[in-house]
Amino acid sequence: MPQGLFSQLLRFGGVGVLSTLAYFVLYLALRDLTGPQAANLVALLLTAVANTAVNRRLTFGVRGSEGALRHHAGGLVAFLVGLGLTSGSLWVLHSVSPDPNRAIEVAALVVANAVSTLVRFLALRQLMAHRR
């Protein structure tokens, strides 16, 4: 697989779209049961682990177990940044409006996830792109 930035961005984007859809399905399914913060944590954690594993192979062409622990630790750091961004956006939103409608809540999460995605790509690329 070519390891150019453009091809990596395309593959990362495809994985990201699927991960984001899965995140929002999980978030919305859990939201009324657990509240926004817990739903965000669970949905983000589940999708972040899968996202790192899939990106490791498809985006960065890393096969086998060599470096897997380091790669997933980097994914965990990116997850924590994403958790801070998404949880922070929910906290701010609920501080301003105690009961916002779901569309506004999801819009805030979309923005936070977009920033988080950029951080995730840069972190994972730094960890995986040139270490084979």
Image: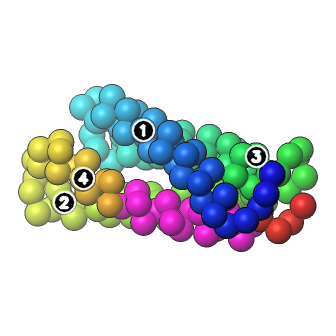
Q: Secondary structure at mark 2?
A: helix
Q: Which residues are magenta?
A: 112-127
Residue 120 is inside the magenta segment: yes
First in residue order: circle 3 vs circle 4: 3
Residue 129 is inside the magenta segment: no
First in residue order: circle 4 vs circle 1: 1
Q: Secondary structure at mark 1?
A: helix
Q: Secondary structure at mark 3?
A: helix
CA separation in Å, label 1 and label 2: 21 Å
Identity of the amino acid at label 3? Arg
Say which residue label 3 marks.
Answer: 57
Identity of the amino acid at label 1? Leu
For the residues labelled 2 and 3, say whether their Cβ atoms are less than 8 Å apart: no
Identity of the amino acid at label 4? Ala
Say which residue label 2 marks.
Answer: 93
CA separation in Å, label 3 and label 4: 30 Å
CA separation in Å, label 2 and label 3: 36 Å
Q: Which mark is residue 107?
A: 4
Residue 1 appears in view? yes
